[in-house]
Structures are given as structure tokens and as C-alpha cells.
Image (cartoon, helix red, strand yellow):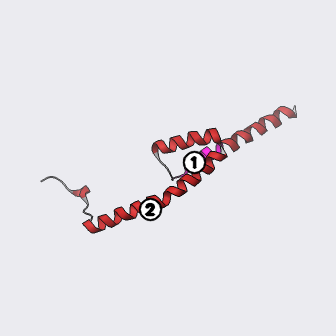
Amino acid sequence: MIAPLVLTTGLFYVALFHALPAVLVAGSGRVRGNDLTLWIIAVLFTSWLGFVAFMVVTTMEQPQKRAANAALDERRRQLGAVDVSDHRPN
């Protein structure tokens, strides 16, 4: 009688251990939209190896995004960054 309980508990923990990387990717703010969906699918099929790849790839993208955002901020500063959200036709 103890064997089915041990087997069920063991399978639960194996499933939890396998699904944990997908949950971590889904909760991460590193990617959005279709990229997030693709990463979750990849991690579900490859588990921890896919999670390591996710961390490496998204960490490498961060400096590029920061540089692009810094260039965009500099360009806005040079142009005077007019807020167009309040402009209404006369």
C-alpha cells in the first residue's frame, strides 16, 4: 500500500521539477509576446538545459537593449522630447 503513494509522490515531484523552469521563464520579465511563448515551449521540451539557454541569451540581449535605449533617450533629449499625447486638433 505504501508503494503507490511513494510512486505518486515521486512522480509529482519529478513533474514539478520538470515544469519549474517553464514557470520561471513565464514569470520573468526578460521577454514578452511571441518570444515568451516560444521560450516556454522550448523550456518545456528541454527543461533545465533550455532554461540555462534562456538565461544566457536574454542576459546577452540586455546590454544591446540598454545601448539602444540610451541612444533613443539621447536623441529625444536632442530633439526636446515634445509630449505628443496631449496634442488635440484645434
Q: Is 70 displayed left or right of 89 in the figure?
A: right
Query: Which image quadrant for residue 18?
Result: top right
Q: Residue at x 53, y 53 (%)?
A: 58
Whole-percent x, y for residue 76 in the image = 30, 64
Distance from disc 1 to disc 2, alpha carbons, whole Å, reads 21 Å
Q: Residue lying farthest left?
A: 90
Viewport quadrant of the C terminus? bottom left
* Residue at which label 2 appears: 66
Please report whichever mark, 1 or 2, sits nearer to the chain's N-terminal start. Answer: 1
Numbered range of the magenta stretch:
19-29
Residue type at tag 1: Val
Q: Which mark is residue 25?
A: 1
Residue plotted at (58% across, 53% down): 55
Tell me if mark 2 has few (under 14), some (14-19) or many (20+) residues whose alpha carbon lies within 10 angstroms of its own.
Answer: few
Nearest to the observer: residue 27 or residue 5 = 27
- Measured as percent of width and height from the top left, residue 57 is found at 55, 52
